[in-house]
Structure formats: C-alpha cells, structure tokens
Amino acid sequence: MKAVVLFSLLLMGALAPGLAVATGGTSITLPAVADNYADSKYPKSAYGSTSFLFVGNKHDREQDVWGSERIYIRFDLSSLPKSRVILRATLWLWQYYAPSANQTYEAHRVLEDWNETAQNWENQPAWAPEKTSEAVAPALTEVAVEWDITKDVTAWYSAKAPNHGTMIKVAKEIHDPEASSGFWGRIYPEKKWQPRLIVVLGPDPKFSYLVALRAAGLAPGVVSPVSIDGKPEGSLSSDKTMELVFDRGTTHTIQVNDTVAVSPTTRYRCDASQVQVSDTGSYVFAYSPEYFVTLSARPASLFRTPPSGWYRVESVLAFSRTGADLVNTAPGTRVVFDGWYVNGTRLTSEPRMIIVNGSLNVEGRYTVEYYVNVTSPVGETQGSGWYRERSTASFSVDRTSVPAEGFLGTLGLRRSFRQWTGSDSFLGLPTEQQGSLLVREPSIIQAVWDDDWSAVLSNLAVAAALVIALVVVVAVKGIRHDRMRREQPARRRASH
C-alpha cells in the first residue's frame, strides 16, 4: 500500500506562557510546471512527454550500451505570498523503480533555460557545479525521496537568481548496470504521486520577526545546546540553520555553550556565546577548536615552559631549556639532557616554540645518572662509572685468590674473594667474581676478601711433625749415648 510522505517543519515549541515563539510556518505545496530526463545512452532522444523520470547509471542489455540519466524539473513560485521568509523548501519525488543498492543523488541549480519537450542529452542547459544538496534513494520501491533546495528557492523567490529549475544526477556517473531510479513525472495520472515542491514560509513579518541561528567551526556531528531565555531548546551544528519566530515587540536572550567537548583533549570554544534579539536577523556563533596541551619538564628547574592547559588552534607556545647539557645535582648524581619529546617521539633538534594543531604532550627530559664506584683491596676492578637510573651496571675483579704479603705469605697464607657488598640491588649472587646491579642510587661496591689459613696450618703441621721427629731422634740418640757411657766402665772392669 502506498504511503504518502508528508513534510512538516516545527521550528520551536513554546518556551513558557507569555513568551511568543511561533510553533510553525505556512506550508504550501507547488506542482511541477516542467520535467523531463536526459539519457546519455540515447543522446538525441527527448523524454518530456513521458510520465516517468529516470536518474542514475544503467546498462541497456538489448543494445549493449552503458549510460547515465539526469532529471530536469522546474516549479513556478509566482503564487507564493510576497515578502515572506522561506523557512524550508523540499523537492519531493516518488520512487516506483528502485536501484539494486542505495544510491546518492545530487541536486544542482540549473543556470539556463530549457525546453521540456525538446531538451535531450546533447543540448542540456548549464548547471551549477556545486551541489545544492543530496539525498539517498534506497533499494526499495514505493518510497519518497526528498532534496532540501531551500537555498535555491530562496534565491529564486527573492529574485537574486533566475528560476530555471533543478537538475538531479547520481553522485558518480560510472558504468553500473543497476544503479538507476525511476520516479513518476508531472503527467502521471495519479496526482498524489506527481512531483511536488513543499515550501514552508515564515509568519507574516507585520506581526512577527524571524531569527536565524547557525554555529560555525564545529566538526560534522558536533552540536552545541541552545537555550532561549534560560531554557534549553534544541541544538546548533555547522551544517544546519535554526530559524526562530518571535512576536513583534518581544526581546529574547539566546545562548549557546561556551565550550563543547568532543574528547578529553579536544573541545570547541565560542567567545561570544550570547545574543539578545528583538528584530529579524541572522546570528552566527563562531567556534574555534581548542586542544589540551601537557607541558612537562624534568627537572622543572632546568626548563622554562608555559603551563599545561587548553590552547586554541594555531597558538604558538614558546619554551626553552635553561640548564646545561650536564648538571651535577648531588655527590654521585648528575643529570644529562636527553631531548624534547612530542607525543612520545623524540625531536631531532631542540625547538624554541611549537604551533598547536592538535592535542600535544610536550616533554623536556633530562636523564638521571648515578656513579657506581667499584673497589677492592686486592686485584684490579672493572665497572666503575656513570650509569643511567634503573640501568644495569656490570662489574668484576680480575682474580679470586692471591698470596698474603709478609712472613705469613711465605707460610702459605692466601687472601680469597668472598662477596660483593654496598648495595641492596644486586642481580644474581653477590658471591660471583663478576656481578651486576640495578642502578637506583650512587653506590660504592666493595669486594670483601677473607684470609685463607689452610695452607699455613698445613705447613705448620708438617713443620711441627718434623720438629717432633727431630726431637725424637735427638732424644733417642741421647739415650743411646747415655747408655753407652754407663756401659763403658763396666766393660773396662770386666776386662781387668
């Protein structure tokens, strides 16, 4: 069952009792006075006497030709009341033949006169290259498709441009076999499906005045709430104009939001967000993008930077480094200039300013370094030097055991490596000859050595055994000698 798509425009609801905001305009429907279509497949053919209109891309399989179609249509505005404001003008066509997929059709203002029955593809009139509007025709039959041609109708109504009508074409004229729509034309027998222009006029200016509002500078899809006399009434965007109708003799305050946030780091700001109206006029609330810029420096005392905060697009931020490339900050601690980083990327040079064109994280960075001193009372060490904070320092000593000096050394006393001391951040076992640590602070790493008496004791035991053996030998010899002395007198007496 066919359903007529009715067009209506409600401007604003009443704000409160006593406030005179009009609730609508006068809607007038005009029939087409001329229409036809041109077809590049048959460039010499005119279709002004047919009851249908085609637009899009199509393939004639029988003749194997490709082509595009364009609709031309015109309406007579002379019956409209004079000195009124065009609030909205909608071109309405009924689609009875659908494309295989949704198609976008553009409406363009025609710039030259044309003849409904004689015009074809070859003698098409000139038309404005800039589209007035566009509409999407769905892949469905028995539906209405509408184009907003308010701008063109306003120009014709005010006599700022001659009324030669509208041309409708597909957005991309290409070889596409089933991308064409069929609409009923003005001579189709059933009037309710014929083309029409629905014009909504503002109230009589003798008793009311019209205020047009628009937001400029907002990105597509971003809106700013509107309030009238402190009460919310819809929203503004950059692609639509809001019309308000008030009674003559009344004054009203219209306000939009100072800022409109679209993300934690992006917003739009309007410097003049409020107007008072008492007569017909147009007002544009101009917004500019603002971005949140984070400026940080470590250490802060070695930089000069503006504060973090919101900055308008194209703002120029100046900053500088006041510290030297290397600064000693404490015993065993220093900072070394690392560079400037913007959104995490290190710059190849050192800038003096930056232009804001998006959310930024600007950081001037020094790297903290600590001195690690590796010492040992024995042997030679490696690994002393400056290390970045939280880096790994490796160190070692070139030996693990050496003879002790002096007399004890001759007896076999040795000094042996036991462990490293001086930090709580050793990585691995501190008893290894080669060690490492996570650098968190200035550190003095010391090798601890123990005296090894095992050889001395062994040598002393041998010496003691030798001494004992010598004493035993001497004692035995002494005993033998004493025995021999005692035995000699007895032998002499026996011999006598």
Image (cartoon, rainbow, N blue to C red):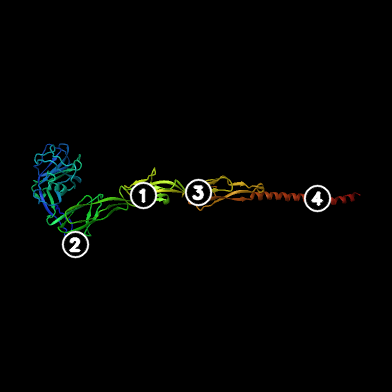
Q: Secondary structure at mark 2?
A: loop
Q: Secondary structure at mark 4?
A: helix
- Residue 136 image position (x, y, % from top left): 19, 47
- Residue 464 image position (x, y, % from top left): 70, 50
As measured in the structure, the alpha-carbon distance from the residue carrying label 1 to the one carrying label 4 is 104 Å
Q: Is residue 126 left or right of residue 477?
A: left
As measured in the structure, the alpha-carbon distance from the residue carrying label 4 to the one carrying label 2 is 144 Å
> Which of the marked residues, 2 or 3, is nearer the chain's N terminus?
2
As measured in the structure, the alpha-carbon distance from the residue carrying label 2 to the one carrying label 1 is 47 Å
Mark 1 in CB contact with mark 4 (< 8 angstroms): no
What is the three-letter code of the residue carrying label 3?
A: Tyr
Q: Which residue is mark 2?
A: 16
> Which of the marked residues, 1 or 4, is nearer the chain's N terminus?
1
Q: Which residue is mark 3?
A: 371
What is the three-letter code of the residue carrying label 4?
A: Arg
Q: Which residue is mark 4?
A: 480
> Which of the marked residues, 4 or 2, is nearer the chain's N terminus?
2
Q: Which residue is mark 1?
A: 361
- Residue 474 visible in the picture: yes
What is the three-letter code of the residue carrying label 2?
A: Ala
As measured in the structure, the alpha-carbon distance from the residue carrying label 3 to the one carrying label 4 is 75 Å
Q: Nearer the viewer's eye, disc 1 or disc 4? A: 1
| Above or below, 77 relative to 252 | above
What is the three-letter code of the residue carrying label 1?
A: Asn
Say few, some or many: other residues with alpha carbon within 10 Å of mark 3 (under 14 / 14 to 19 / 20 or more).
Answer: many
> Which of the marked residues, 3 or 1, is nearer the chain's N terminus?
1
